[in-house]
Image (cartoon, rainbow, N blue to C red):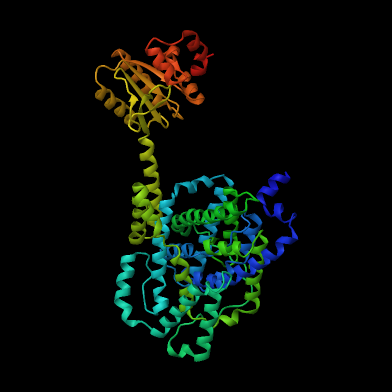
């Protein structure tokens, strides 16, 4: 009972055994990430189409809930650029009538994501994220980063741009409105980018985003730049978030469901990837994919009921959290405590914060998400994955975020199906002077006898690939000509045989033998032998035609086999006795 409770509440594992030596690292990391979260939370909320204060709300209760339910000790949960943009895209489809309804939809989206992730964790569905292959995630992330960056141009240049997630529409709108650029706003934004980009070179723990925020506030306040047209955040409500409730309207849920599924999968994929990377550096605890889903689901429930919006684990914050010395989830609790203090006492300080500085925070953050190296690497090493990455990238840029990730998942599945339907097959020949057999297309000087066709199938034999296997064997038989007297099936790499495969194999054996082609099977695995037994294939092939290795089959064909040895090894080849 205690083990089950500890597994569901990981905090009960590390908190009772907390070591005082970890306190300094957790405190340092918690304060560092908390300082990062203040400008990032506000900037990402603005990106999501919400008031900046909701970004701070999203890193209070959700952060605490993840610390209780999550298995990663270093993952920093909160708003991220990708999820913020997806939130804006999803809610935009509902055409909300005003800010209050927009917030209601954001809360509802967070609740739906929490429900999906919690349910997936409860039903042990963490493996589903494996359908998002690395090339798909890379292409999708790079395209989304570009869309996110372009969406911030309106704040950086202070020009009017429509809310769109299609690059062609955004490019046209930017070209039409670029002449209205407010150069003072642009100057502040560029200054913010330079501070954030190069401030990190001072020291890895230097709070560059906060420094940019401070400089922006001082410039607006000192030179009264609001009077010169610089847009500011304005009044930021103080105090802790009050209880809120999502909408339970089914029509709203139906509209939000596709984007909620997308955020659930993409958010978890991003979160688990960075959590796994960091955990590999520590190895003093284990990550549980299903419990991570539960932890993220609970964090999103917290956002839904405390005026936040969808959250997940972030790459940059988690890296900073780890580098600053985080050892346990207490670091996240310290971060949440700092945000609470800010909400209670310091929100007035953000009144003169320029929107261009928040745009700068987002732009620098997403610039690191554009991966230039991966497509180049894939072009040289794996063309199929390159085209999958490129297709996802182009579809996301031109048709939108939601379409892009769905297309990427479909492409991943199609590639899996295509590869599964075309298993690697090899003709085998003997290495001269040995009992070792290898692929005749890979090695020279192998003994490849005209009267023998030795075939190895590397993969399962089932309904999706049976025609491909049949056609390849037929082609090889045609190439070898009428001199072939026996087919040797090496099944050491066959992992599974379904009913379709069993029926076809039975037909092949019957047909070939009617054509005076003998057939034998070698090196089968236990589960495959069980299947052969169940479908009567060992009886069809003949127990005396089942061998433990290729050499035994060749000796049988040459009539040089030691009958006593064959009989002794027969049970190991057939598992009949």
The number of callouts visible is 0
The residue at the point 28 percent across, 14 percent down is 515
In percent of width and height, residue 228 lies at 43, 89
Left or right, 340 with reference to 162: right
Left or right, 463 with reference to 54: left
Position of the N terminus by quadrant: top right
Q: Is residue 476 above or below residue 69?
A: above
Q: Is residue 32 above or below residue 282?
A: below
Position of the C terminus by quadrant: top right
The residue at the point 41 percent across, 69 percent down is 149
The one of 378 and 34 positioned closer to us in this rendering? 378
In percent of width and height, residue 84 lies at 48, 65
Q: Please identify the quarter of the rendering in which residue 144 is found.
A: bottom left
Left or right, 103 with reference to 545: right
Residue furthest front as drawn: 433
Q: Is residue 468 above or below residue 14?
A: above
The residue at the point 72 percent across, 56 percent down is 15
In percent of width and height, residue 140 lies at 40, 57
Q: Please identify the quarter of the rendering in which residue 335 is found.
A: bottom right
Residue 352 visible at all: no
In percent of width and height, residue 170 lies at 34, 69
The one of 83 and 485 positioned closer to us in this rendering? 485
Residue 113 visible at all: yes
The residue at the point 42 percent across, 77 percent down is 155
């Amino acid at each position: 009972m205690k083990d089950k409770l500890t597994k569901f509440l990981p905090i009960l594992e590390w908190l009772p055994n907390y070591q005082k030596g970890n306190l300094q690292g957790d405190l340092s990391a918690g304060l560092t990430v908390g300082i990062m979260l203040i400008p990032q939370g506000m900037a990402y909320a603005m990106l999501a189409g919400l008031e900046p204060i909701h970004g701070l709300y999203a890193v209070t209760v959700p952060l605490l809930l993840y610390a209780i339910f999550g298995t990663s000790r270093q993952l920093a949960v909160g708003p991220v650029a990708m999820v913020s943009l997806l939130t804006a895209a999803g809610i935009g489809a509902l055409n909300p009538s005003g800010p209050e309804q927009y917030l209601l939809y954001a809360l509802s989206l967070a609740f739906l994501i929490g429900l999906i992730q919690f349910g997936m964790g409860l039903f042990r569905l963490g493996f589903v994220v494996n359908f998002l292959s690395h090339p798909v995630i890379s292409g999708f992330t790079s395209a989304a980063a570009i869309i996110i960056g372009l969406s911030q141009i309106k704040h950086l240049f202070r020009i009017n741009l429509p809310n769109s997630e299609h690059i062609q529409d955004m490019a046209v709108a930017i070209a039409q409105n670029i002449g209205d650029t407010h150069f003072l706003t642009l100057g502040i934004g560029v200054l913010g980018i330079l501070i954030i980009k190069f401030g990190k070179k001072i020291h890895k723990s230097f709070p560059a985003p906060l420094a940019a925020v401070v400089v922006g506030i001082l410039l607006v306040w000192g030179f009264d730049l609001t009077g010169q047209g610089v847009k500011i955040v304005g009044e930021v409500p103080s105090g802790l978030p009050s209880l809120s409730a999502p909408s339970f309207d089914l029509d709203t849920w139906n509209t939000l469901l596709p984007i909620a599924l997308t955020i659930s999968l993409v958010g978890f994929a991003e979160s688990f990837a960075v959590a796994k990377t960091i955990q590999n550096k520590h190895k003093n605890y284990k990550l549980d994919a299903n419990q991570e889903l539960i932890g993220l689901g609970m964090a999103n429930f917290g956002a839904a009921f405390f005026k936040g919006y969808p959250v997940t684990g972030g790459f940059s914050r988690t890296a900073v959290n780890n580098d600053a010395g985080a050892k346990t989830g207490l670091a996240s609790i310290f971060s949440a405590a700092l945000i609470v203090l800010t909400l209670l006492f310091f929100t007035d300080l953000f009144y003169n914060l320029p929107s261009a500085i928040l745009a700068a925070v987002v732009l620098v953050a997403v610039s690191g998400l554009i991966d230039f190296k991966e497509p180049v690497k894939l072009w040289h090493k794996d063309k199929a994955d390159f085209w999958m990455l490129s297709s996802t990238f182009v579809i996301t840029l031109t048709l939108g975020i939601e379409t892009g990730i769905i297309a990427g998942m479909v492409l991943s599945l199609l590639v899996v199906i295509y590869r599964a339907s075309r298993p690697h097959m090899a003709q085998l020949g003997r290495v001269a002077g040995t009992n070792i057999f290898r692929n005749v297309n890979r090695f020279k000087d192998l003994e490849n006898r005209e009267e023998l066709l030795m075939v190895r199938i590397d993969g399962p034999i089932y309904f999706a690939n049976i025609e491909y296997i049949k056609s390849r064997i037929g082609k090889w038989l045609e190439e070898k000509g009428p001199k072939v007297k026996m087919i040797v099936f090496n099944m050491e790499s066959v992992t599974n045989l379904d009913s379709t495969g069993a029926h076809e194999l039975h037909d092949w054996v019957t047909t070939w033998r009617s054509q005076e082609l003998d057939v034998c099977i070698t090196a089968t695995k236990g589960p495959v032998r069980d299947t052969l037994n169940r479908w009567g294939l060992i009886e069809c092939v003949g127990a005396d035609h089942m061998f433990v290795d290729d050499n035994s089959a060749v000796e049988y064909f040459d009539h040089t086999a030691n009958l006593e040895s064959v009989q002794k090894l027969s049970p190991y080849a057939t598992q009949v006795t």
